[in-house]
Image: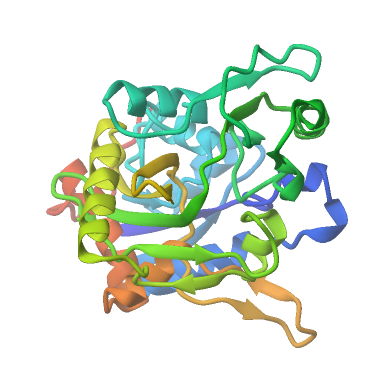
Amino acid sequence: MKVGVFWRKYRNVEQQMRITPDKIYDDAYEEAYHHYSALREAGYDACLLEWKRDPRETLRDIRKENISIVFNASSLKEVAFLETFGIPYVGSGIDLVPMNKAKRKEIVAYNRLPTPRFVVASDPNNIPDINLRYPLFVKPIEGRGSAGITEENIIYRYEDLPKVVRKITEKIGQKALIEEYIEGREITVGIIGYKDPMVLPIVEIEYNDTKTNTFEHKMYDREKIHCPARLTRDEEKLVKDTALKIYRVLNAKDYSRIDMILGKDGIPYFLEINTFAGLTTDSGRDENGKMKIHHGYMGYAAKAAGMTRGEFIGKILESAIERYGLGQIEKPLTYIS
C-alpha cells in the first residue's frame, strides 16, 4: 500500500493573504513533509503529491505513483476531486466539508448541544436584526486559520458592527457569522477515528497579549498552551462527552478538532469543527528567526497522550484504511476514469 500526501501552496493562509499579504508565511510544504515523514516512521510507503492547478495532472501523478490512499485532503476542491475519481482518502467527506459554520452550528443546535446563538450578514448594509446578547463575535462563515480575526471582531456596541462585517464580506469575500461572544476559557478537543473514535487530551489556549485568538497569535505560536487543560475531572468528562457527540452528529471521519468555549456557567459551547486540523507535533523557525512551521493543536494533544508523530499520524491513516476496508490491499486501486 502506498500513501500519497497532498500539499498545496498557501492552503492555510490564502484567506488572510487578502487582508495582510505582507504578514503571512506559508508552511504548506513543511506541514505535508511532517506528515510524510511521520508515515514513513510508522512503516508506510509514502510520497508527497503537490496539488496542481490542472486536476488532470494531479490524477496522472496519483496513477504514476500507484497510490492506494491519499492523506491530507486540504480543502473542498481536493475532496471533490478525490470523490469524483473514487480515490480513497483520509478525513471527512463531501457531506461535512462543504458545510459552512452556520450550517454546522444548526445541526449541533438541532441535536440539543450547546452553541452560541447567531445570525449571518451578507454585507454591511444588510445586517439582520440583532436579537443577541452583547458582546458579539464576528468571523468569516467559511474561515480557517483565524483568518480576518483581530480584537476588533469582538463587538460591544452595534455602531462597531458594520466595519467588521465589511472587512469580512469585502476583503475576504465571505458572509459574516455574527454570534454571541461567550466569556470563558478557549479549549479544543482532537478526536481520531470513525467507528470507535478516540478523544485526545484537551488543549486549553490561553491568550498571551490579546483578548482572542487572532491570526498572528495563533499562526505564530504566541499562545500559552496547557495540555492537558486545567479542568476538574467533572469538567473534563463533560467537555469530552460533548465533543464526541458533536463529532458523531456531524459525521466527522478519521480526525477532526472541536473548538469550544467553556463558559463561566460551566457549559462547553461549540464554536466550530476543524476538518483539516493542524497535526504538526512541533514548531520551527529558520536561521533568521522566521516561522517555518506552525505547531498544530492536535499535535500538542497527541504528545500529551504519549504518542510519537509516527503513532499519531499512523493512527489517523489506520482509521481511513479500516473505513475503506483496505487492510488487505496489495495492489494499487483502479480509479474511476
Residue 337 visible within the image = no
- Quarter holding the N terminus is bottom left
Query: Which residue is drawn at the image coordinates 26% and 31% (left, top)?
Result: 249
| Extreme-bottom residue of the structure | 287
Residue 250 placement: quadrant:
top left
Nearest the viewer among 65 and 47 is: 47
Q: In the drawing, does residue 46 fall left or right of residue 205?
A: left
- Quarter holding the C terminus is top left
Residue 64, position as x, y percentages in the image:
45, 51
Number of on-image labels: 0
Q: In the drawing, does residue 186 fall left or right of residue 154?
A: left
Nearest the viewer among 262 and 102 is: 262
Query: Which residue is drawn at the image coordinates 53% and 25% (left, top)?
Result: 118
Residue 23 visible within the image = yes
What is the image's colouring?
Answer: rainbow
- Looking at the image, residue 131 lies above or below residue 336: above
Q: In the drawing, does residue 167 fall left or right of residue 222?
A: right
Nearest the viewer among 129 and 103 is: 129
Residue 317, position as x, y percentages in the image:
29, 57
- Looking at the image, residue 77 lies above or below residue 295: above
Residue 319, position as x, y percentages in the image:
22, 52
Q: In the drawing, does residue 231 fall left or right of residue 283?
A: left
Query: Which residue is drawn at the image coordinates 58% and 36% (left, top)?
Result: 55
- Looking at the image, residue 181 lies above or below residue 239: above
